[in-house]
Structures are given as C-alpha cells and as structure tokens.
Image (tube, rainbow, N blue to C red):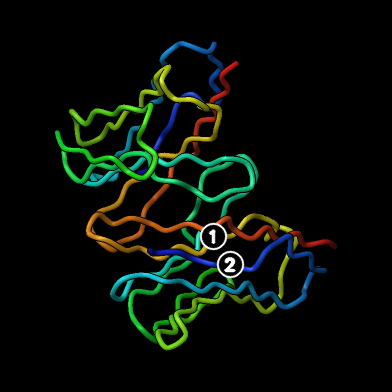
Amino acid sequence: DGGITQSPKYLFRKEGQNVTLSCEQNLNHDAMYWYRQDPGQGLRLIYYSQIVNDFQKGDIAEGYSVSREKKESFPLTVTSAQKNPTAFYLCASSNGPRLEQYFGPGTRLTVT
Amino acid sequence: GNSVTQMEGPVTLSEEAFLTINCTYTATGYPSLFWYVQYPGEGLQLLLKATKADDKGSNKGFEATYRKETTSFHLEKGSVQVSDSAVYFCAPISGGYNKLIFGAGTRLAVHP
C-alpha cells in the first residue's frame, strides 16, 4: 500500500534534548512538508522540500531543522532552541504544484 | 495576506440532518481548493477538491463548489451520520511553493 508513515506515534522527551521525528513516503512524490498543529488550531508550515537535497523554511521554522537526502525520507529535528515544542506534528507529500497533499498519521510530541 | 475563514464550531447536528460548513478565503491568483477531514488523534484525510471556478468536488456524499465571485467553497452534505463527527478544514493552496492555508477548522458532532 502506498502512503506516508510517521514514527513513533507518541514521543516523550525532557526539556533541553533534541529529538528527530521520522517521515517516510512510498508515493514517489517529489515534494514533502512538515506541519505543526496545536490544540484547537489549524496547521502551520514548518519546513518544506520540493526536491531531494533542497528545502526551505516555512512560517515557523525557528528551533527546527530538516534534511532531504533521499526522495522517500524527510526527517524533522526539534531542537532545544524550540521554545514550545509540545505539539502534534504532521508530515505530508504531494506530486506537484497546486496538487493535493497527502498526510501521515502524525507524531504527538510531549516535552516536559 | 492569504487566509481562510471557516464558521466557528462546534456544529452539533442530529443524524440525517443537512450540513453546511461555510468557508471563504483570500488568496493570490486562482488557488486550488481542498476540504480535509481529521478524526480524533489522526492525520488529515483529503475529502474533496476543486481546481478551477465552478468546479464541484464531491466524495462520500459531501460536496463543495468553487465560487470565484464570492471566494467561497462551502461544504455540504444532505444527510450526516454519526461517523461524520470530526474536524473539517477548508484549505486553499497558494503561492509558488504549494503552501496550504489552514484556518482553525470546524468541529462537527453528530448525535444519534
């Protein structure tokens, strides 16, 4: 089955630690995205990548980093510089401009 | 700037009632328009889409028509079910990098 996988589903970390969230897709999509969702709110774009070895900052990139070394993978690192990292993180991919994005199941990160 | 406005929730309906969730947007050019649905604790699923003026998107009994003159994309369903209870997001896509614009979403609760 084609789709997007995110792991783990739940993640707990202590304040001051970096943590990496996994996102893998087997849809052969060029573009991939990371969003953050806070309770009762919509999604906000963190980073996006339109092609391998290239990525750009979204609206709330501070405190986050990404890499895109393979077409299938777009991991997100939440660094200790992120002031309020507890949130639900969603990865998405699409096959081109103005086309629909397909979302993974999300990772819920809790930092205490 | 680009934005989307959805009716505030929660919207509470009885099973088999008619549903309308209003959505208006501001965006540069002529965006593609999407409705996504999010069930509790899950990622977003694409519900329907429309890519140009007067297009009607439909899926699972839901419909929405791209109204360029009113910049609207209202979601409708003739007879809701308990299983339709979820949060619904209207999201235009705009900009050179395929950015989805999200509002806060509308929570729908359907009671038997």
Circle 2: residue type: Gln
Residue B53: which quarter of the image?
bottom left
Seen at 67% across and 64% down, the residue is B8
Image spot of residue B99 (x, y percent): 33, 55
Where is mark 2, residue-wise? Answer: B6
Where is mark 1, residue-wise? Answer: B89
**Circles 2 and 1 on the same chain:** yes
Q: Are marks 2 and 1 in contact (CB under 8 Å)?
A: yes
Q: Which mark is residue B80?
A: none
Query: Foreground: A88 or A84?
Result: A84
Image spot of residue B11 (x, y percent): 74, 65
The N terminus of chain A lies in which quarter of the figure? top left
| Circle 2 crowding by C-alpha within 10 Å: few under 14, some 14–19, many from 20 | many
SS class, disc 1: strand
| Circle 1 crowding by C-alpha within 10 Å: few under 14, some 14–19, many from 20 | many
How many angstroms separate mark 2 from mark 1 (CA)? 8 Å
Query: Foreground: A109 or B60?
Result: A109
Give the total of numbered labels.
2
Image spot of residue A21 (x, y percent): 41, 25
Q: Height in image: A38 above or below B80?
A: above
Circle 2 chain = B
Seen at 41% across and 20% down, the residue is A81
In this view, the mark in front (2 or 1): 2
